[in-house]
Amino acid sequence: MSFVSIRDLKVAFDGVRVLHGIDLDIGRGEAVGLVGESGCGKSVTWLAALGLLPGKARVTGSVRIEGRELIDARPGELESVRGARIAMIFQDPSSSLNPVHRVGRQITESLRLHRGLRGSAARAEAIRLLDMVGIPSAATRIDLYPHEFSGGQCQRVMIAMALAGRPDLLIADEPTTALDATIQAQILDLLSSIRRDTGMAMVFISHDLGAVSAVCDRASVMYAGRIVETDNVARLFGAPKHPYTRGLFDAIPDLNAGRARLVPVEGTVPDPRNLPQGCAFAPRCARATRFCTAYAPDLKLQAMGGKVACFHPDQSSEPMRETQVVVA
């Protein structure tokens, strides 16, 4: 049985559908990547699952944590899950941390809410968490404000806050986007070691294929509010089947290709208010036929494993370039 099970999750804003029926399972201790361009629905999926979207959003479907339904749950039920069972690291730590409160106060607030710790016990645990995520001289820096930390250190503080409730599942939403390459690698190593030490599950949301390959067991590729391919990382990164997935890999620069031109995925993600009929990727796909422009493919199980939503999946076994799965 899955620890978290999402079924037919749909989201609309002012009548415009942005998620079109997401099915996703997360097992205990598993790391799952969500990949895709900006605007594909990766973050909205989990904001909807945790009840964090604005009131104008219409959310339908099912999100269950060990059989406990979260969609349309009472606020008190959601609050008992958020932070304690499922925690989220948001994209921009500089806007997620309160600039007028010391970081120690922000972490101890989480410890009080989720674990009932107060006073010296909460402070000692906050120092331990800051030390665990690699903040140097944690005992003296706990009383600093967010602006007194670097971008990478603010991200580490956010991770410490997320871990304060000892969650069973950590949602890491683009946790390395605004960081330089060296700090990115450090944050990825930190997330991997924390997951290994605590046994928690993790959902890693990113457009960085190399980062996903470094920390995840399984990955799902999203496009225009749908999952178009899902498989374990070895198969998905070794021989992607969906033309969009293949395009994402082909667009990565090959360090050994000299001055060869990049191969972009032409076009952009369609506007949710004006989706094309049939397969949403058809206008950008070199393999699209009239059938593709008339009908939308379902996510189908493949003979070699994994699922693909495509009428003409790539059946070749040609391996991807090694450079494409190396963390930048």
Image: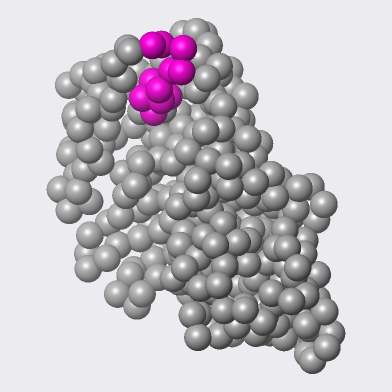
From this view, report whether residue 195 is shown above or below residue 312: below
* Viewer-proximal residue among 15 and 31: 31
Residue stretch in magenta: 248-258
* Viewer-proximal residue among 130 and 118: 130
Residue 19 image offset from top left, x and y in percent: 35, 53
* Viewer-proximal residue among 237 and 211: 211
State the residue at coordinates (22%, 60%): 16
* Viewer-proximal residue among 131 and 231: 131
Coloured how? Answer: one colour
State the residue at coordinates (34%, 68%): 58
Any part of residue 173 in sight: yes
Q: Is residue 188 left or right of residue 59?
A: right
Q: Quadrant of residue 327?
A: top right
Dominant secondary-structure state across the stretch colored magenta = loop
State the residue at coordinates (41%, 25%): 252
Any part of residue 230 in sight: no
Residue 294 image offset from top left, x and y in percent: 19, 30
Residue 72 lies in magenta, yes or no? no
